[in-house]
Every structure is written in structure tokens, then in C-alpha cells.
Amino acid sequence: MNRLEWKKSLALWFIVLALEIWSYLAFSLPSFSLPVFIFIAIGFLIIAIYKIEYALIGAFAELIIGSMGHLFFLELGDFRLSIRIAFWLIIILVFAFKFLLQFIKQKQESLYFQRIKNFGFLNIFSLLGIVVIFAFIRGLLSGTPIMIVINDFNSWLFFLLIFPFLALIDFKNRKLVSDLKVILFASIIWLSLKTLFLLVVFSHNLSFALEVYSWLRKTLAGEMTAGIWPRIFIQSQIFSGAAFFVFFVLAQVSLKKANSTLLTGIHNSKACLKNFLSRDNLILIFSSALTFSTIVLSFSRSFWLAFALVIGLALILIWRFYNFKETITSLAWLIISFIFGFILIYFVIILPLSQFNSSNLNKGLSKRLGQDSSEPALASRWSLLPVLWSEIKEAPLLGKGFGAEITYISSDPRVLERNPNGEYRTSAFEWGYLDIWLKIGILGLLIYLILLLKV
């Protein structure tokens, strides 16, 4: 990144910090909630009208920063209007207006129409859309309360953003690509910094920790769990894992290119070391360390497993298509990133704010890795599985529609607190792909997987 891109990133961090503070104030002072929501929505609308592509990029950034999308929200009776839904509505409406205006003037020669028409996976995407609409209608006709159906269905509406993305994002536009890179980079780094800040708050039990916890729960930002070591799980931390591997690939490409253009034409250890310690590579290592620390602090076994599998696959591919030396270099880069990631975590813990024992991280990691099926979260998932399978078998081909609910026995302490026998009814399930199968059937799931693989 050049100097201008760093300045833009810094400006974005200050903007996001201000938004986080506003969100906290809206939680603490309910009367502040409505005006700040309207102010942000109007500001976003102005951006969308003036430069809709930047509004679209901003919406993608909110997916990373906002976790579940409720950093700001309005309570409208039984319905909660989140800022994410507001952003989505604004983009779709403004894009539809611009698209129609352009199409009326230029017909099928319009730029937006041509870009969407030339999308290679339009047929598969259209099939998925038909399946999803059918599942929505089936859910409405099932007798399930309409708000449950809508809340289950609305996340699929975000697939519609593919149309403005195809029409608006021109990767030949260097300025737009540069700004896209800056916004996504700034969002990922902010998520890591926020995770470390929350570690400071909860590990040192600061005076405002309870208020911060309540704010995070109210805005659905994540799950903070007490124990030997505080678990700081934010749903959008999955993007940190993806970002880590983007940084890793960028570093490998950069190092390979630099090492292959040495004037000597042969392996030069000093030059290779110089490339390894270059400013750009150190920035990539530090960025990777930040994202790695986020994955560690999530205490998510699913994240850890996926992370380990992708690392193993990446090293195997490097060994297969390059050579053993390149594999060792890549492994060294990874190890250094991991070490720096743990150093960041320990640095936060040793801040002279309390007497928190940093060795608890080792105990917490060991306990998390070694937990058996009797642990509440795991026990709940395994208790759900046979019931979920039973429901899937009732409509395996086309699914039961959105809003389909299942009752099972949960071991979650929060459920047991409300219902001592553990009986819990929900339409959202831990087993992601089985959830999709239940709602849109095996045909819908196969179309969804084919689309993911092709894209």
C-alpha cells in the first residue's frame, strides 16, 4: 500500500471508531438511537446516489465490521430494522432506479444490462433464486408465524447484491480497485483491533466491562464467555481467516517475484533475507499476526479446524507445484506470523491493568481442544443432529421452507435457565448445510454448492 492508501485507511479507522462510539451511545441513551440511525441512513443514501459503487463497497465493509448487522437498529413493534437491512434496501432501490433509467435510454446496449447478461453463472444463480423463492412461499403457507419466516429468509436477499456488484464494480478502474482494497483492509484490521480491545476489557475486568458486554449482546456483535480465558467470538471473524490467507498468498507471490529477479541469477541468502525483511513483507506478517490473534481469541473449534486444514492444503500445494525449499520458506513465514500473533495476545494481557494470569491462555486452549461431547455446546449440537435428520427426511427433495422449526433438548446454560428440562424450539441451527437442506431441499443445496464451487 502506498502513502495515500495508508492515509485513507487511517481516516477510515477514525470513522469506524466514531461509529462504534455512536452505537454504544445509542445503546446507553435510547433517545439517541433514532436520530443517529436516520443520520447514518440518510448519509448512506447520499453516497449511494452520488457514487453507488462506494455505497456497495461500504455495505461489504459493514458485513465485516458489523458482525450480525445490528450495530444500529430500530425497534418497530416486533420487527427490528437493522442498519444492514437499511443499507441493503438503499442500494437495491437506488441501483434499480439507475438500472431502469439507463435501460430505458439505451435498451439492451446499456452498460449495466450487458455486464449482468455476460455473468457466466447467471443461469445457476437464477435457478437458486427460483428455489429460494419457492422455499419462502412454502414457509408462508406452512402456518409458521410470518416474522419467523421473514427473519429466516432475509439473509438470502443479500445474494441480490451480486447484480449491482456485477454492474458497478469495474476492476479496470484502478482508483476504484485501490479504494476497494483500502476499505476491505481497514475493515479486517479494525475487526482484529476490536477483538484485542475486548480482550483488554474482559481479561482485566475493567469497570465498564458489564456495560460493554450488554452493548455487544444487544447489538448481536458476538458472544463473550467467561472462563479460564475469556472467549471473544464475533461471527464476522470468519473474514479474518480468509484475510490471513490473502495476506499469505500476497507475501508468497511478492517474495517469489523478488527472489527470482536477483541479479546473480542464483540463490542469494542475503538478498532473500533482505526481501523477507522488506517493509511490504513485514506489513503482511503483522497484518497476518493480527488476523491470527483474532482466530485464536474466537475459541471457535470450527474456525480452528478450517484454518488448520487450509494451511495444510496450502503447504501441500506449494510442495507439489514448486519445491521443498519454497515450502520451508512458506512454513517459516507462517510460523513467524503465528509467533507475532501470540505475542500480541500476551502483550495485551500483561498490560498493568490487573493481575490476570497470562498462563491461562494455554489452559484455555488446551481445555477448548480437549473438550469432549459432554461439553454443553457440543452436547447441544449432537442432540440436535438426529432430530434435524428426522425433519429433513420428511421433505428431502424440496425442503420444508423457510421458518421450519425444530424442538430438541439443549444443554445450553442459557436455555436451561429459561426452561429447566432443556426443551428448545428454533429455526436456526448449528449444522449449516443441513439447515440449508431442511429449508430448500437437496436440489437447492446442490445448486448452492455448485454456485460456490464455480465462483
Image: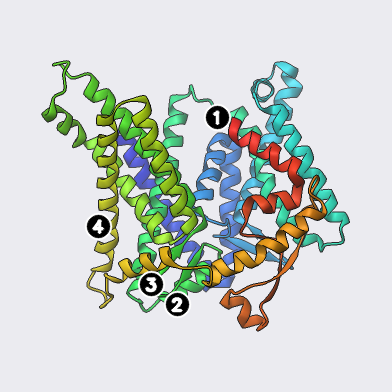
Instruction: Check disc 4: other Cα within 10 Å, few if <14, some if 14-19, many if 20+.
Output: some
Tell me the CA gap for discs 2 and 3. Answer: 9 Å
The colour scheme used to paint the residues is rainbow
Q: Residue at x 37, y 41 (%)?
A: 8
Residues under numbered marks 2 and 3 in contact, where contact means CB atoms less than 8 Å apart: no
In the rendered image, which residue does mark 1 sit on? 169
Q: Residue at x 55, y 29 (%)?
A: 169
Closer to the camera in the image, 393 or 30: 393
Tell me the CA gap for discs 4 and 1. Answer: 38 Å
Please state which of the two labelled residues, at mark 4 or mark 2, is closer to the viewer: 4
**Can residue 85 be seen in this snapshot?**
yes
Please state which of the two labelled residues, at mark 2 or mark 3, is closer to the viewer: 3
- Residue 253 shows which numbered tag? none
Q: Earlier in the sequence, mark 2 or mark 1?
A: 1
The number of callouts visible is 4
In the rendered image, which residue does mark 3 sit on? 202
Q: Earlier in the sequence, mark 4 or mark 3?
A: 3
| Displayed quadrant of residue 254 | top left
In the rendered image, which residue does mark 2 sit on? 210
Q: Earlier in the sequence, mark 2 or mark 3?
A: 3
Q: Residue at x 56, y 64 (%)?
A: 220
Return the x and y of residue 39 as percentages of the image width and height.
57, 55
Instruction: Check disc 3: other Cα within 10 Å, few if <14, some if 14-19, many if 20+.
Output: many
- Asked if residue 229 is positioned above or below residue 283 in the image, the reply reads below
Q: Quadrant of the N terminus?
A: top left
Please state which of the two labelled residues, at mark 4 or mark 3, is closer to the viewer: 4
